[in-house]
Amino acid sequence: MNMQSSKSKLVRNGIIVLLIPSVIFLVLLLAYPQNISLANIPLILSQAIAPAILAWGVSFCLISGNWDFSIGAAQLMAAIIGGRIALQLDIGFAGVAVFAILAGFCCGLITALVFYVLRIPTIIVTVGMMLIYESLSGVFFDGFGVSMPPGYLVVSKFPNNFIVLAIVFAVSYYLHNFRKIGYHVRAVGNNAVVASLSGIDVYKIKATALVLASTYAGIYAMYSLGLSGTQKAASNMQTSSLVFDSMMCVFLGMALQRLCNLVIGIYIGSVTMQLIRLTLLVFGFPSQYNQIIIAVFVLVFMAISYNGEGVRRLFEWFSALKQNEKVTAE
């Protein structure tokens, strides 16, 4: 009996999770049938891959209580260094994969060492490292970035893009659910003092989360180069937008965590973000307001998710108020 109830609960939760992006897409389909059709679904799912990859890396930081604003710049460095080395050695996209991920790992290692040695808040460390990495992107290779030839664009076509998604998803699921790091980041994030008393090295776990986040930034760089083929140097905190986009995906995933696994929730969050952007584009909202509207949506969604009982009581209060008004009028 318990097994049947758990299965029915799992199915119900799965339907609710899928209902969120489905409702947004249905609204678009009904409002603009001339521009939106079922043929757009594969494109939306593929556009959600890159943000999800970076968000899976960021999740280790946010869960453990870190704020990592350097991952966008780490991705920048990983793409330029990894792409340039692969081109110079003429070893194809496999070289991009190896050296981009390795460069991302090295950036994360440097950031983690700075944090571990100085013992200052991660938000300060990562903002500083973001500025350093962005400056270096304008120095390395004379600031020209990297441009890959057409033969390197191997993940721009189906099914290669979804193969990358499946591999990164599997690795993320394994790390979050079957490795000590997944349990330790949750323990540190829930209560760092209790985790420390339990024998967990809090600073080591936070540093490891920074390394993992930048390694995922390297994977993102690999995917980005295999998709678009170009990466320009950046400055003046231009990479911060990438950080906020990934954080929003994680926040949506964390809000959905009561209904599904976090790793699944992050990808659903990424799909939802793409649908919101498409909605704003279709309805003609000015692009400069996109981030504001998306941020408001995320805040409202998280408020409803984390305060479901409070929202229910609010609706009950309004219903009772209307009922009293009717009685008074009669």
Image (tube, rainbow, N blue to C red):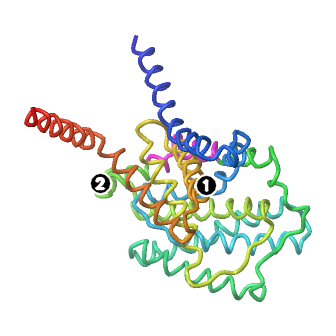
- Image coordinates of residue 287 in percent, x first then y, are 57, 68
| Residue 221 image point, x, y percent | 70, 64
In the picture, the quarter occupied by the C terminus is top left
**Residue 172 in magenta?**
yes
Q: In this view, which residue lies farthest toward the top?
A: 1
Q: Quadrant of the N terminus?
A: top left
Q: Label 1's element?
A: helix
Residue 199: image location, x then y, percent: 36, 53
Image quadrant assignment for residue 108: bottom right
Left or right: residue 244 versus residue 100 is left
Task: Give SS at disc 2.
Answer: helix
- Residue 25 position, x and y percent, is 58, 43
The span picked out in magenta is 169-183
Residue at point 84% right, 60% down? 153
Q: Main secondary structure of the magenta part?
A: helix
Badge 1 or badge 2: first in the primary sequence: 2
Which residue shows up at 78% across the image and 85% down it?
141
Please tell me whether residue 7 is drawn above or below residue 189 in the rendered image.
above
Query: Is 154 displayed left or right of 267 in the figure?
Result: right
